[in-house]
């Protein structure tokens, strides 16, 4: 039978209790261990699995699972160490059929831990790749466990009862219910696996030194000094105790098996130390060493996978959990993290120290902190799931320099951000990260654009700096979310008010003129000479009482969504002792709309003003306050939007498109640019409307084609493999009318490009419309990115584009169309006649579907796309195909180097 994955390939994945198992294809060498699992099953479980209590069926099943390849099935094993804990297999009854029978078995001692479901998820993945579209399974009606595994899988299932048996048909389409079910199981397993890391009952520091400068001694000291509630020991063969903590010569000689081991040994010693920990039964590791070479890195991760240990690091600062029941500070930071409600995960230890300090100073504190370092295993995705379920965290802060599984991360973040703000620093925005590309679409799709697309779709608040992140966190931690961008600026100094209004405008906030009734009310509570048009100039004479009344009016009125108060110290307030800043914090509770302050004499970038009511963030600069408000506005808008769905599309022929791509790559193993006829056929397969055109090989066929296309003015475009930008090289003639002009144009092109030209495309001149660009880039890490914006030959210079990661939902498409600056032209600006918006949505959705279906689609560049009131037509299409197999971002598996 064909293996369900490449021969010898294997992955590791988590069970529902956090245990790690290996999932790999079965082979002839596995027969003995598979048979041991089957024959070790109880008579009752043998009967439920094989419909008989005899062992003959078990022998036949082991033969089938471990048989040599025959092309019509696949089998997977789940192993814990060398023990087979479960098997799953599919077999087609007839070659090439779209359906296959399945078998599933789990060792008795492993029931109830999710092995069967995990195996079926991987079997579904393998079967889909083999062209199987549905599974059939037979079970006894009393086999409730098997029937529950099938029903809980999340796939559409039909049952037919036949006496004592149930016949199940399982459709393998990867829809939202299935992805949600996989996601929920992954969350349960992931959180369980992090318990030994973040809530350990015991810790050992391996490599704790006696020297004051020892990192291990610092780690041990922090664990003791900050009150770790569990058992604590050190491993050092040269010391009996270190600062009162007992030391032991080796991991094997520890008097207990620690949940967590912190490795503070040199890089060269890390793999052996990890292996010793694994053999001793340690459940999790933190590795602080840096500079591991490739062999050491592989050795470390292999030990963790082999023994089922989760790993933080290497090259990290450590981790902490401020929960009183744990009080875990396994870091070598100089100061302990202050207990609080912010979850923090960083790749850079320096950034981590800065964030811990800022959050402590603000009084926000942290619930848990993880320095991910080189991120061999535990990632930001894991931590988001932990914070979602810990019952403490209400704010998530991330600093990620890389993404292992961006689409999986995006899905998790999108869910978590519905419950709490998720903030990140967008690291690595330089143009040095732009990859080389030839088409307009690929040249525009910078790394920054790709990351921003991920953050935008997932509802992640992406800031440009640590300071910006902390400033925004201070607002989100203390104030209600603004309902919109309308901001009132209040100040006791006119010049400061102008600066604040400019900062709001630059941040994308509105400073609307206030309605007359509200103006009258404001003037009634403010000092004589005040102006209340917005900005509100309260004058230097404003008292605390007057400012409080002004804030009450503004935050209770519906004319604005937030208030920015800008204050400078004045001699008047100093003389009277009536400091207006004292009323910024409400006397009790929280004001109905957010209030932020900019105190121009403040000596720190941001602080929280405490008082009887909810704290108010105060910034040293109005621009910082405005940016924080703008981030909050964007996040509130995202949360208020309904969840998008991927709309169903008709007229899609994925099998035909796949066959076209397969044929092209068979003839061009290294890939390349598709010719016009293949490009047209691929667009046809996805129902993307094209203007009429014909391929012509000489002047005579061009003239004949013009007659078939209805005559009129024509465009003639030369073609040869590798030609991308026709205008740049003069390979395009427009407004040709009549046979003579068409013949002459073809002659000029064929003469000029005689050595390379293989033919030309002839099509009628299109009418007037908005020239757009639509395209796809297949990012090797992020997956397919759909790009849209103003097109034409100057598309890169004008740089008016937006992008979203595929698959596009209905909300994503709407955002794509409305995001570019050219969007008003599509809605009829000046002409009064909007473009065919439904046709434009369909074009983008179908491009998205094409990119998801065809991982070999490296680039697709439709430029220009002509948007008219009656149609949306791609006038020129370039598609580049490369041999590539997509990695399923939602299949449950742990990282592998």
Image (cartoon, rainbow, N blue to C red):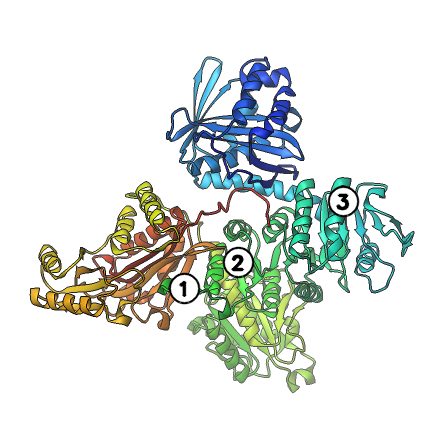
Return the residue at label 2: 460
The answer to whether residue 514 is left or right of residue 462 is left
Name the residue located 56 percent from the left edge and 76 percent from the top edge: 622
Relative to residue 546, is residue 687 drawn left or right? Answer: left
Q: Report the Cα–Cα distance between label 2 and label 3.
A: 37 Å
In whole angstroms, how far apart are the C-alphas of marks 1 and 2?
A: 28 Å
Q: Secondary structure at mark 3?
A: helix
Question: Can residue 553 be spotted in the picture?
Answer: no
Which mark is in front, 1 or 2?
1
Q: Position of residue 274 (x, y in %)?
A: 73, 47
In the image, is residue 604 above or below residue 842?
below
Residue 277 bears which disc, if any?
Answer: 3
Q: Can you identify the residue that label 1 sits on?
A: 437
- Residue 720, given in percent of the width and then of the height, sits at 26, 61
When the figure is inspected, residue 531 is found, relative to residue 652, above or below; the finding is below
Marks 3 and 1 sit apart, C-alpha to C-alpha, by 47 Å
- Mark in front: 2 vs 3: 3
């Amino acid at each position: 039978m064909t293996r369900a994955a490449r021969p010898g390939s294997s992955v590791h994945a988590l069970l529902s209790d956090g245990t790690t198992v290996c999932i790999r294809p079965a082979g002839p060498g596995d027969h003995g261990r598979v048979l041991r699992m089957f024959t070790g099953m109880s008579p009752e479980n043998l009967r439920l699995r094989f419909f008989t209590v005899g062992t003959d069926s078990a022998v036949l099943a082991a033969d089938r699972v471990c048989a040599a390849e025959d092309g019509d099935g696949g089998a997977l094993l789940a192993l814990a160490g060398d023990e087979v804990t479960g098997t799953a297999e599919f077999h087609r009854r007839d070659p090439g059929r779209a359906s296959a029978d399945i078998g599933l078995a789990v060792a008795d001692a492993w029931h109830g831990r999710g092995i069967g479901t995990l195996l079926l998820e991987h079997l579904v993945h393998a079967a889909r790749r083999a062209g199987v579209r549905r599974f059939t399974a037979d079970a006894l009606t009393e086999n409730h466990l098997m029937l529950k595994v099938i029903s809980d899988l999340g796939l559409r299932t039909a049952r037919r009862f036949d006496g004592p048996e149930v016949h199940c048909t399982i459709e393998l389409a990867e829809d939202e219910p299935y992805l949600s079910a996989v996601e929920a199981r992954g969350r349960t397993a992931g959180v369980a696996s992090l318990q030994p890391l973040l809530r350990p009952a015991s810790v050992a520091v391996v490599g704790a030194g006696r020297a004051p400068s020892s990192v291990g001694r610092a780690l041990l000291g922090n664990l003791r000094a900050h009150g770790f509630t569990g058992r604590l020991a050190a491993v050092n063969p040269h010391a009996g105790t270190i600062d009162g903590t007992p030391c032991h010569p080796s991991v094997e000689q520890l008097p207990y098996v620690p949940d967590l081991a912190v490795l503070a040994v040199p890089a060269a010693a890390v793999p052996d130390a990890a292996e010793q920990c694994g053999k001793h039964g340690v459940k999790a590791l933190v590795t602080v060493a840096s500079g591991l070479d490739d062999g050491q890195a592989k050795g470390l991760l292999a030990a963790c996978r082999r023994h089922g240990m989760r790993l933080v690091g290497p090259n990290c600062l450590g981790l902490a959990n401020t929960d009183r029941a744990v009080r875990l500070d396994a870091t070598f930071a100089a100061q302990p993290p202050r207990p609080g409600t912010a979850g923090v995960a960083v790749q850079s230890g320096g950034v981590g120290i800065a964030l811990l300090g800022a959050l402590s100073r603000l009084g926000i504190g942290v619930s848990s902190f993880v320095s991910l370092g080189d991120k061999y295993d535990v990632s930001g995705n894991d931590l988001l799931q932990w914070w979602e379920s810990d019952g403490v965290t209400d704010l998530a802060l991330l600093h990620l320099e890389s993404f292992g599984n961006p689409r999986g991360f995006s899905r998790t973040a999108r869910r978590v951000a519905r419950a709490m703000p998720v903030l990140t620093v967008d690291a690595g925005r330089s143009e040095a990260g732009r990859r080389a590309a030839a088409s307009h679409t690929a040249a525009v799709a910078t790394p920054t654009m790709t990351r921003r697309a991920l953050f935008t779709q997932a509802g992640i608040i992406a800031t440009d700096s640590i300071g910006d992140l902390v400033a925004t966190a201070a607002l989100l931690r203390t104030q209600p979310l603004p309902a919109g961008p309308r901001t009132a600026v209040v100040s006791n100094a006119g010049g400061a008010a102008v600066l604040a209004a400019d900062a709001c405008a630059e941040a994308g906030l509105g400073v609307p003129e206030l309605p007359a009734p509200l103006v009258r009310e404001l003037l009634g509570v403010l000092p004589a000479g005040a102006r209340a048009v917005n900005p509100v100039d309260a004058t230097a004479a404003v008292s605390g009482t007057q400012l409080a009344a002004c804030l009450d009016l503004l935050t209770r009125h519906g004319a604005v969504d937030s208030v920015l108060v800008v204050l400078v110290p004045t001699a008047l307030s100093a003389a009277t002792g009536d400091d207006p800043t004292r009323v910024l914090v409400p006397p009790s509770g929280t004001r109905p709309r957010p209030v932020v302050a900019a105190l121009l004499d403040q000596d720190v970038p941001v602080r929280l003003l405490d008082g009887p009511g909810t704290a108010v963030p105060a910034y040293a600069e109005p621009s910082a306050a405005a940016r924080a408000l703008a981030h909050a506005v964007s996040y509130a808008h995202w949360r208020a939007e309904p969840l998008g769905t991927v709309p169903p599309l008709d007229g899609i022929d994925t099998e035909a498109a796949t066959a076209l791509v397969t044929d092209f790559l068979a003839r061009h193993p290294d890939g390349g640019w598709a010719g016009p006829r293949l490009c047209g056929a691929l667009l046809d397969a996805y129902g993307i409307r094209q203007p009429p055109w014909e391929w012509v090989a000489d002047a005579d066929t061009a003239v004949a084609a013009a007659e078939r296309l209805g005559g009129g003015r024509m465009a003639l475009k030369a073609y040869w493999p590798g030609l991308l930008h026709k205008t740049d090289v003069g390979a395009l003639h427009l407004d040709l009318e009549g046979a003579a002009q068409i013949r002459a144009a073809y002659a000029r092109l064929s003469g000029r490009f005689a050595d390379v030209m293989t033919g030309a495309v002839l099509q009628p001149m299109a009418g007037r419309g908005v020239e757009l660009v639509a395209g796809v880039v297949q990012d090797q890490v992020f997956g397919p990115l759909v790009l849209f914006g103003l097109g034409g030959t100057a598309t890169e210079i004008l740089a008016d584009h937006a992008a979203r990661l595929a698959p596009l939902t209905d909300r994503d498409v709407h955002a794509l169309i409305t995001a570019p600056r050219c969007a008003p032209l599509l809605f009829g600006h000046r002409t009064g006649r909007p473009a065919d918006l439904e046709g434009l949505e369909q074009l983008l959705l179908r491009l998205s579907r094409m990119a998801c279906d065809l991982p070999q689609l490296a680039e697709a560049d439709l430029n220009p796309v002509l948007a008219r009131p009656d149609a949306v037509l791609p006038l020129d299409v370039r598609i580049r195909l490369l041999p590539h197999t997509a990695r399923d971002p939602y299949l449950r598996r742990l990282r592998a180097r």
